[in-house]
Image (cartoon, rainbow, N blue to C red):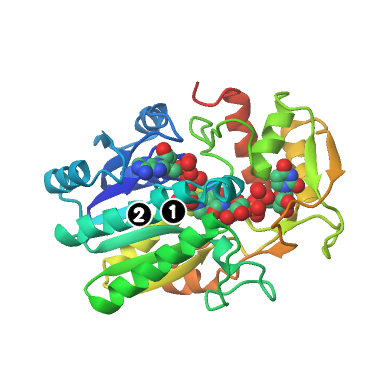
Amino acid sequence: MLSHILVTGGAGYIGSHTCLELLNAGYRVSVVDNLSNSKFESLNRVHKLSSADQKIDFFECDILDEQKMTEIFQQQKPDAVIHFAGLKAVGESVEIPLDYYQNNIAGTITLLRIMKTCNVKNFVFSSSATVYGDPASVPILENFPTSVNNPYGRSKLYIEEICADIFKSDDSWNMAMLRYFNPVGAHKSGEIGEDPNGIPNNLLPYISQVAIGKREKLSVFGNDYPTSDGTGVRDYIHVVDLAIGHIKALEKLSQNPGLVTYNLGTGKGYSVLEMLHAFEKACGHKIAYQIVDRRAGDIAECYADPSFAKKEINWQATHDLEQMMRDAWNWQSKNPDGYN
Ligand code: NAD
Ligand code: WQD
């Protein structure tokens, strides 16, 4: 049984929701985060929401800091690592690829080297559906070919391949590659949620900021895709469902499965305009938008076949679109300036 989990990037959007689920499930949790894209306040709120007596041991530290990280591992002695820490903006990764490779790939190599030295060989990795590139068909299964066209996606794919090489060399490792589709929403309390810096890159945070009056209108990137209404289709998944997927993956790792890969998605795709109209329902008013050109690198459709995760780890998403939108709006309206 794995009982003590070290979470890198645990103060971030998906990390904070996962820490809460871990605490509530009785795990001991240590977090390493350099707070480059998050605030410690998220973990204060996790403590407020948690039913557990245990508090998170927090370390403000960069995963690239080998010495400090080694000390943390030696002192904390975790059984497993959930690795969220990473930079995640596709467009930015095209501008500053070296920073992405350094932070995401070199950071992960540093982490994995320390894990090996400290004999911690249970690893859950935040991968992404981006590794499927533009799929030949949907829904997407785990055995579909991979293809990437930007440094962010390449960093995810290379890390998956590095993990495969490590496992080949030493099969005492247990590693779960979790390929997330599009995480949205927030904890139903509205206390924790997504708090992007600057102009949001992703659809839901952008719609939320238009709804709250911080931005004028949504730009819909293209309405000439071969989809039902011409706008892009994605598999949006509630962040709490995603967080629970990590608990299920840890349970699997405790059975020594070796290297495993799961899609974490709902299996259902929604278009940009469907998302916009669903959000209008949740917030109770119209949201302004304009159709603009396609965004470079975007694909028409992407949604998961999540049946492998259902079969192997008994996980499936339970929140529907209405709940995702309600919770996203609850967070946004309660925290118009995020954690500030
Ligand atoms: P996030 O930015 O909210 O969280 C990442 C956290 O990692 C932040 O708290 C940040 O401060 C921390 N961090 C970054 N670099 C670090 C470093 N070198 N050392 C220590 N801490 C560091 O992002 P998120 O949306 O919660 O994503 C978590 C993970 O899931 C990322 O690896 C991301 O690539 C992956 N992912 C996210 C999405 C998405 O759409 N949100 C989709 C697929 C995969
Ligand atoms: C969704 C849809 C856009 C913003 C990205 C990464 C992926 C993963 C999740 C980390 C698309 C449209 C968006 C806007 C719009 N992240 N859109 N106007 O592109 O599916 O995936 O985030 O791993 O790797 O690539 O998500 O939220 O940016 O876009 O019309 O202002 O919304 O064109 O159809 P995407 P997204």
Establish if 38 lies above or below 312: above
Q: Which mark is residue 266?
A: none
Residue that lies at the very extreme toward the left in this rendered image = 75
Residue ID for mark 1: 101
The residue that appears at 65% across and 64% down in the rendered structure is 303
When the figure is inspected, residue 231 is found, relative to residue 304, above or below; the finding is above
Q: What is the quadrant of the N terminus in the image?
A: bottom left
Residue 72 left/right relative to 292: left
Circle 1 packing at 10 Å, graded few (<14), some (14-19), many (20+), is many
Within 10 Å of disc 2 (Cα), the crowding (few <14, some 14-19, many 20+) is some
Q: Going from the N terminus, do you reach mark 1 or mark 2 first?
A: 1
Please indicate whether residue 150 sits to the left or right of residue 25 in the image: right
* Picture quadrant where residue 245 is located: bottom left
**281 left or right, relative to 104:** right
Q: CA distance from mark 1 to mark 2?
A: 7 Å
Q: Amino acid at mark 2?
A: Ala
Residue 241 visible, this orientation: no
Q: At x 43% / y 73%, what residue is drawn?
A: 312
- Give the label on residue 106, or none: 2
x, y percentage for residue 157?
48, 65
Can you give x and y, in whole percent of width and height, for residue 266 in the image? 60, 61
Label 1 secondary element = helix
Marks 1 and 2 in Cβ contact (< 8 Å): yes
Q: Which is nearer the eye, 127 or 45?
A: 127
Residue under the image location 44 percent in, 67 percent down: 314
Mark 1 CB lies closer than 8 A to ligand 1: no
The answer to which image quadrant residue 24 occupies is: top left
Q: With respect to residue 29, does 305 lie above or below? A: below
Left or right for 227, reference 43: right
Looking at the rendered structure, the secondary structure element under dot 2 is helix
